[in-house]
């Protein structure tokens, strides 16, 4: 089983069609899809992005698993977005860069996710040339995980700077991470599995911006056990998603 925990639609119907063809060629069973746009979206933009995900997911409902995007700064409106997503079959929550992961506005989102038993996938990156305003880094993910140990929290992109990212969340056993991103540094997957354990690493691609075959090869070519590869590529995500 292969589950891509980190995929996007930016254009419908083009991308759902092309991604589906490539996913089936490579043996991918499911892709978790969300959409993002401006850094701090207004409520109408959030509505548009989530509607696009629903439209694209409906084109191939067996393949695509929808994640609902929200802006925690919207307060009760953000919670309403999640309730609406749940009514449309959402499997998880996508948080991007509208606010830092440890900001108090995220706390109601985290509690809602716990109460409804859905994971949060949160963007995280440490950039050498400076982060976007309110773009979370791994230590902020750790603070959120420490405050909500029951939350199924997935740090996207291995935190960007993957050696730092792994070390920052290592002590928070409730935080997993996905392997998404364009980098293919030697030893990346091995470090993640060795430091976090094979149950806390999930395959993610970040398609369509990144080549799906390349991101699968990062895991399949890693010097880890066959059992660990099976968990990273699919069974860990299946557990979090209740599949």
Image (cartoon, helix red, strand yellow):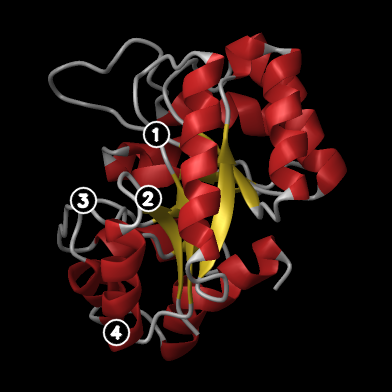
Side of 25 relative to 99 (left or right): left
Q: Which residue is mark 2?
A: 8
Residue at image location 28% in from the left, 87% down from the top = 25
Residue at image location 36% in from the left, 38% down from the top = 159
Q: CA distance from mark 1 to mark 2?
A: 8 Å
Q: Which residue is mark 4?
A: 26
Give percent across and percent down for residue 234.
51, 76
Q: CA distance from mark 4 to mark 1?
A: 25 Å
Side of 35 relative to 67 (left or right): left
Give percent across and percent down for residue 42.
49, 13
Q: Earlier in the sequence, mark 2 or mark 4?
A: 2
Q: Earlier in the sequence, mark 4 or mark 1?
A: 4
Q: Is residue 49 visible?
A: yes
- As displayed, is residue 169 above or below residue 26? above
- As displayed, is residue 49 above or below residue 201? above
Secondary structure under badge 1? Answer: loop
Q: Which residue is mark 3?
A: 209
């Amino acid at each position: 089983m292969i589950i891509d925990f980190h995929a996007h639609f930016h254009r419908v119907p083009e991308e759902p069609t092309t991604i589906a063809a490539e996913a089936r060629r490579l043996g991918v069973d499911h892709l978790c899809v969300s959409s993002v746009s401006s850094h701090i979206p207004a409520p109408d933009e959030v509505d548009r992005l989530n509607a696009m995900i629903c439209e694209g997911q409906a084109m191939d409902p067996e393949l695509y698993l929808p994640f609902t995007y929200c802006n925690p700064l919207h307060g009760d409106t953000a919670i309403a977005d999640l309730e609406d997503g749940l009514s449309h079959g959402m499997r998880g929550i996508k948080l991007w860069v509208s606010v830092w992961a440890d900001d108090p506005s995220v706390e109601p989102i985290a509690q809602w996710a716990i109460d409804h038993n859905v994971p949060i996938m949160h963007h995280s990156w440490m950039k050498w040339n400076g982060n976007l305003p309110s773009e979370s880094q791994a230590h902020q993910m750790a603070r959120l995980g420490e405050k909500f140990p029951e939350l199924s929290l997935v740090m996207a992109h291995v935190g960007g700077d993957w050696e730092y990212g792994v070390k920052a969340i290592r002590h928070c056993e409730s935080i997993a991470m996905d392997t998404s991103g364009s980098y293919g540094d030697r030893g990346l997957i091995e470090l993640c599995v060795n430091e976090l354990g094979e149950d806390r690493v999930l395959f993610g691609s970040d398609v369509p911006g990144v080549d799906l075959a390349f991101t699968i090869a990062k895991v399949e070519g890693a010097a880890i056990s066959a059992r660990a590869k099976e968990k990273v590529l699919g069974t860990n995500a299946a557990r979090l998603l209740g599949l």
